[in-house]
Image (cartoon, rainbow, N blue to C red):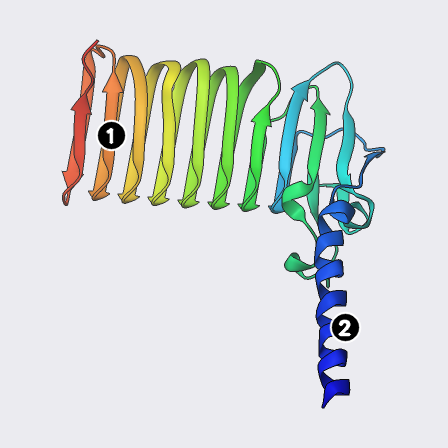
Amino acid sequence: MRGCVRSRTLLLALALISLLALPALAGETTSENRQIGGFSGIKVSGGYTIVLSQDSTVSLRLEGHKDDLAKIVTTVVDDKLVIKHKPGIRLFSFNRDDVTVYVGFRDIKTIELSGANKLVGRNPLRFNDLAIDISGSGDVRMDVEAVKITAEISGSGEIELKGKTDTLAADISGSGDVRCGGLKTKKAALEISGSGEAQLDVSAELSVSISGSGEVAYRGNPAKVDQQVSGSGEIRKIAE
């Protein structure tokens, strides 16, 4: 009996030592530069932090645990930079939240996020036409200057944009959130199906369609406002 107790005590001690060692192992980060060709879009699936910066050359750098980086595929397919985990890798087998991918680009037209990714802009980014597509709980935060921005959220994703654009078209299906109160917009068209929310700053034209319990709050004095609500949704103007 005493031998069994001692064995259990030893096993518990070893388990405790292993648990205490995990944070130290997780803290061993490394940086890895990868060579890539040109691209006009970004497609990410998984759960990483993506940091965008606009430059005269393209670049790609990954930071994280060495073993985790080895499980990530980065390649250009159909003019899109694809970032994903290798086939057969179980998502819980590595610390995706501890992986940061730094992407330098000249110009991009599309951003696609699938999963719990977080994408941020390091500096004010300039685009002609930009399409953002979030499927899942992705998060996009950028300071931008664009001619036209198209945003689509399917799920609980969130898009927060600041800066200015001529045109904003957004479609929310689910409980997504479009936070563009800091984005000076001339024309905005918004469609919500579900419980999504949006904040806008519009100066010329605003068109809103809500089906469900969605909510839209806007600032500005657009000369033309078209609104259609089916359900318990709400459209309200924010006082200046």
Q: Residues within 10 Å of mark 2 (few under 14, many from 20)?
A: few
**Amino acid type assigned to the residue bearing label 1 in the image:** Val
Identify the residue at image location x=69%, y=40%: 99
Quarter residue 51 falls in: top right
Is residue 21 rendered to the left or right of residue 113? right
Residue sitting at 67 percent across and 42 percent down?
A: 98
Tags 1 and 2 touching, CB below 8 Å: no
Report if residue 79 is visible in the image: no
Find disc 1 in the rendering and name its residue: 216
Q: Residue sitting at 66 percent across and 47 percent down? A: 96
At 25% across and 20% down in the image, what residue appears?
Answer: 218
Residue flagged by tag 2: what amino acid is it? Leu
Quick one: 56 or 147, which is closer to the camera? 56
Alpha carbon separation for disc pair 1 and 2: 60 Å
Mark 1 secondary-structure assignment: strand
Q: What percent of the width, then of the height, locates residue 128?
A: 55, 17
Look at the picture and state if 240 lies above or below 134.
above
The residue singled out by tag 2 in the image is 10
> Hey, which quadrant is residue 160 in on the image?
top left
Secondary element at tag 2: helix
Position of residue 107 relative to residue 234, above or below, is above
Observer-nearest of 179 and 93: 93
Q: Position of residue 34 (x, y in %)?
A: 84, 34
Q: Nearer the viewer, residue 96 or 196?
A: 96
Mark before the other along the chain sequence, 1 or 2: 2
